[in-house]
Amino acid sequence: MRGPLHQVGATDYIAPMVCVAALYHFTRVPDPAVLRGPLLDVCEAGGVRGSLLLASEGINGTIAGPRPGVHAVVSHIRALAGFAGMEWKESTAREMPFGRLRVRLKREIVTMGQPQVDPTRTAGHSVVSADWNALISAPDVAVIDTRNAYEVAIGTFEGAIDPDTENFRGFPAWWHANANKFHGKRIAMFCTGGIRCEKSTAYLMLQEVKNVYHLKGGILKYLEEVPEEESLWHGECFVFDRRISVGHGLVEGSHVLCRACRRALSPEDVRRPEFELGVQCHHCRNKYTDAARTRFRERQRQVELAAARGEKHLG
């Protein structure tokens, strides 16, 4: 939903930017299903789209819409028992970055597959953005990126270790295979918005790793608060919406998405001969059958037809 147009000049008008809020909060929820209906109602009333996950361990998601609608949703969640301390990261998008609204019930708000891990009881030291550079520059600190490999590929912190995992569920196995490499080190972990690195620290503490830290608010908070000239971040940060990536100041990045393999592509990647819009990129050119690529081409044709009609293709 868009608000009124703002006048710029006598004949020039621009639409207001869409407000985007990334949020999560670990807290014990006795019956997550009870929260779903009222939360849906508040989102729909405010013209808010996006994805929210509810589980017995809390809430996680990203929403977008008019700022008053987004703030109404955040206020509704923070008024729930156990959620008063929930924080969120706010940014903007030129267009609505979500096609629909989803509020889903899940076993975990971020899937690690380790039911004994409870960040509400045990978690590592939280480090604010202003103190992060000093921590990760210390010689006795190992910096670990807890995100998926395709996210790490477009940007990460200077000197960070990439576990090269396909999903967060793979992190415990990676740690067990590599834990001996970090003997005597302090461990600093980070992720997009803070949820994965916070849960990772809880997991490591259960493995009796004592000196564990995580970046409060994640990369998004760091890019919002730390000036680019002082930053140790290189590249862009992958986000799970139509913006694909953001940079310093949380401005929209330069990446686009391969609609076949869902990898983020730089402008240089798009110029490669293997790239075909909506069909393939150099990462997946040998991954799919001719029949699959035929389906992708038809999907891209439907996207272009919808655009010609001035509509959004939601497939």
Image: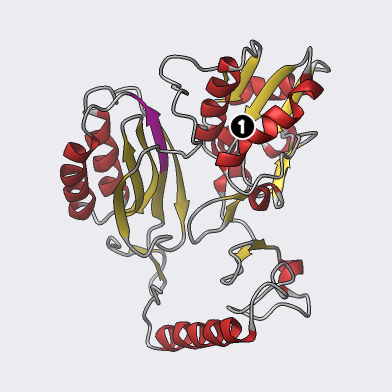
Majority secondary structure of magenta residues: strand
Q: Depth check: 248 or 50 in front?
A: 50
Residue positioned most to the right: 139
Q: Residue at x 74, y 34 (%)?
A: 232
**For the point 58% across and 43% down, which residue is it?**
249
Residue pointed to by mark 1? 172
Which quadrant holds residue 294? bottom right
Q: Position of residue 21 (x, y in %)?
A: 40, 44
- Estimate the x, y position of residue 198 in percent, counting from the top left: 53, 26
| Relative vertical location of residue 254 with respect to residue 194 in this rendering, above or below | below
Which kind of residue does numbered mark 1 sit on?
Pro
Position of residue 238 relative to residue 75, above or below, is: below
How is the protein colored in the picture?
Answer: secondary structure
Q: Is residue 96 magenta?
A: no
Q: What residue do we see at 66% from left, 12% from top?
A: 211
* Stretch of the chain drawn in magenta: 22-27
Q: Residues within 10 Å of mark 1 (few under 14, many from 20)?
A: some
Element type where label 1 sits in the image: helix
Q: Position of residue 32 (x, y in %)?
A: 24, 36
